[in-house]
Image (spheres, grey):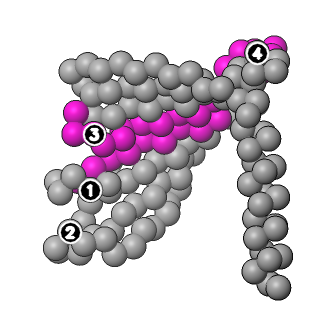
Amino acid sequence: MKTAILTSVFAVLVSTMNLGARNIITYSNVESGEFGVKKEYVSINKETSKPESKGYYHYDRKGNIVEKTVSIWNDEKGWENLVTYTYQYGDANKVTYITCTRWDKDNARWSEKSDVTVHIYNDKDEFLTTKRVQVENKAAFDLVSQK
C-alpha cells in the first residue's frame, strides 16, 4: 500500500515537472580558445518567446570549471545578474576554493561580501571537509591553502 502511494506521489511530481519543462527551450553557445572553453546557455519560454535565464560557464584547458554566472531576464532592464561563482584549484588539480558573490540589485553591482567555501584535504590529497567563510571584496585577498 505504501509503495502504491509513494509511486503515485512520485508520478504526479514528475508529471508536474514535465509540464513546466515543456514550455522551456534552451539554446547554447560554445566557444573554445587558448584559455579553455566558454559556454552560455539561454532558456526561453516557448509560449511567450521571452528569455528567462542565462548561465555562463568558463572551463580551463584541463576541463575544470573556473567561473559560473547566472542571470535572469528583466523586461525593463534586460539581463540581471543573480550570482557568480569562481573556482580555484590546488596542485593536485582538486578544487580548493569556491567563491560565491551575489548581485546587489540596490546598488547595481556585485556585493561587497563573498562567501568562500574552503575545501580541506589531508597530506594524501584526500578530501576531509569544507569550511565556509565570508570575505570583504573591497580589497584583493589571497587565500593560502594548507594541509
Q: Which amino acid, by three-letter code, is at mark 1?
A: Lys
At 16% from the left and 54% from the top, the residue drawn is 91
Figure check: 10 above or below 74: below
| N-term-proximal mark, 4 vs 3 | 4
SS at mark 1?
loop
| N-term-proximal mark, 4 vs 2 | 4
Distance from Cα at disc 2 to Cα at disc 3: 19 Å
**Residue that label 2 marks:** 125
Determine the image quadrant of residue 35: top left
Figure check: 100 above or below 103: below
Left or right: where 91 falls relative to 142: left
Q: Which amino acid, by three-letter code, is at mark 4?
A: Ser
Callouts 2 and 1 close, C-beta under 8 Å: yes
**Residue that label 3 marks:** 63
SS at mark 4?
loop
Q: Which of marks 4 and 2 is in front?
A: 4
Distance from Cα at disc 4 to Cα at disc 2: 48 Å
Decide which of 77, 16 is in the foreground and name it: 16
Determine the image quadrant of residue 58: top left
Residue 82 horizontal/vertical position (percent): 65, 35
**Residue that label 4 marks:** 49
